[in-house]
Amino acid sequence: MRPSSDLSGLGFVKNGIVETIVSTYDEERSPNAAPMGVYTEDMRNIVLKPFKTTQTYENLLKLRSGVANITSDPTLFHRTVFKDANPEGRVPGEWFTHAETVDAPRLMNADACIEFRVISVEDSEEKARLLCRVEKILMIYKPTLRVYSRAVSAVIESLIHATRIEAFLASGEAKKAKDLIGLVKHYHRIVEKVAPNSKYSEIMSDIKRRIDGWRRG
Ligand SMILES: Cc1cc2nc3c(=O)[nH]c(=O)nc-3n(C[C@H](O)[C@H](O)[C@H](O)COP(=O)(O)O)c2cc1C
């Protein structure tokens, strides 16, 4: 394995954050997955910064193993950030298989998987910084030719903002929430323009419904 060339081959640049979906096992060994930003400082290890309130953080502390799944599919981001968007209220078990080198599940539908072990944990008040050693990179070769749709990035940006909007509204940080809600509205308009009546516009409507609900309290 050559993590260095493989990480750059996946599009990593030093200290640049990329968005992945991190899968882990919980205490009952049920698979969990959640979108998480990841970066590398040395092209050999990766760093995660989960909020300490997340299940992902709890699972990584216990088993010290995880997989950063690489995808640009907005549906995978949507269904792993909001578990209740799934029919059974959790990410379907059949989406996962076991990783090869670490005690963690991986997403079968990902384009590539980075299997990692947590080697150090630094805590701050809200977030932790987890330094993780890359154990294996699994490339799942699929046809990669895809048209570029602005809707894909707009939906993923909106999902990132949505999780922060929920937190800001809950903590009374109204100005920060309002600014992000403005951005989500902007992305919603883009999606309605470039992909009306699509799976992307459905996700945007779901995000809007959630924001309206959080605002009502
Ligand atoms: C693209 C994207 C990136 C995210 N990055 C992070 C992150 O780096 N750290 C974090 O704590 N939450 C991040 N989130 C929010 C978590 O995915 C969200 O809180 C999730 O519900 C946590 O799930 P869990 O409790 O199962 O771990 C991100 C969300 C999205 C959509």
Image: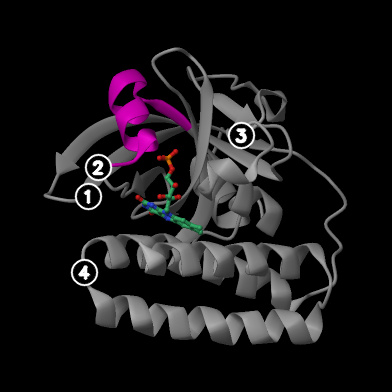
Whether residue 105 can be seen here: yes
Mark 3 or 1, nearer chain start: 3
Name which residue lies at 55% across and 83% down: 185
Q: Residues within 10 Å of mark 2 (few under 14, many from 20)?
A: some
- Please say whether residue 58 is one of the residues in the magenta stretch: yes
Residue topped by disc 4 = 172
Q: Which residues are magenta?
A: 52-66
Give, as a three-letter code, the residue at label 1.
Answer: Lys
* Image quarter (top left, top right, bottom left or bottom right) of the C terminus: bottom left
Task: Indicate left or right for 163 with 127 as reference.
Answer: right
Instruction: Specify how the rendered protein is coloured.
Output: one colour
Is ligand 1 within 8 Å of the beta carbon of the residue shown at mark 1? yes
Which is the main secondary structure of the residues drawn in magenta?
helix
In the image, 67 versus 150, the foreground residue is 150
Residue furthest left in the image? 125
Mark 2 or 1, nearer chain start: 2
- In whole angstroms, how far apart are the C-alphas of marks 3 and 1? 24 Å
- In whole angstroms, how far apart are the C-alphas of marks 4 and 2? 19 Å
- In whole angstroms, how far apart are the C-alphas of marks 1 and 4? 19 Å
Residue topped by disc 2 = 52
Mark 1 or 4, nearer chain start: 1
In the image, 187 versus 143, the foreground residue is 187
The answer to whether marks 4 and 3 mark residues whose Cβ atoms lie closer than 8 Å is no
Residue topped by disc 1 = 127
Quadrant assignment, res 140: top right
Give, as a three-letter code, the residue at label 4.
Answer: Gly
The answer to whether marks 2 and 1 mark residues whose Cβ atoms lie closer than 8 Å is yes
